[in-house]
Amino acid sequence: METPPNNRTMAEYYIRRLTQGTISAAEIIGWVDEVIVASAKTEDWMLDISTCSADDRMGVLHHLHAVKGEIDEAALTRLLEKK
């Protein structure tokens, strides 16, 4: 079974989809809410996105850039090909 992509990879995926207009801010907020529930430690970017309005596309985009870590390019490519 394949390991799920890390949060930084997922953030980049959502940045690209939101920029392309193929996903809504509300869907990203839903993802972040799931990440919060599953995480042992809640990070600032999680709370920032989770509390954004579903209409605040630019705010969500801004906070996605705050996700730290390394992008797994292979996983990102697989995600983008699935859409």
Image (cartoon, rainbow, N blue to C red):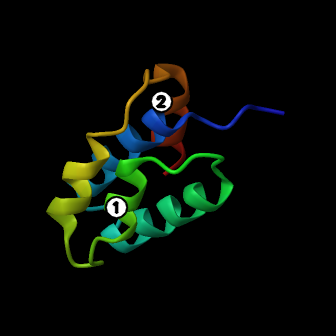
- Residue drawn at point x = 63 percent, y = 49 percent: 39
Which sits in the foreground, 69 or 72?
69
Q: Quadrant of the N terminus?
A: top right
Of callouts 2 and 1, the N-terminal one = 1
Q: Quadrant of residue 25?
A: bottom left
User: Picture quarter containing residue 37?
Assistant: bottom right
Please tell me which residue lies in front, 26 or 52. Answer: 52
In the visual, does 29 lie left or right of 3?
left
Q: Amino acid at mark 2?
A: Thr
Q: Residue at x 20, y 66 (%)?
A: 57
Q: Label 1: which residue?
A: 49
Q: Which mark is residue 77?
A: 2
Q: Is 4 on the left or on the right of 10, as rendered? A: right
Q: Amino acid at mark 1?
A: Ile
- Residue 55 drawn above or below residue 58: below
Q: Residue at x 54, y 46 (%)?
A: 82
Residue 59 percent across, percent down from the top left: 18, 61
User: Residue 31, relative to residue 75: is it above or below?
Assistant: below
Mark whose residue sits in front, 2 or 1: 1
Q: Secondary structure at mark 1?
A: helix
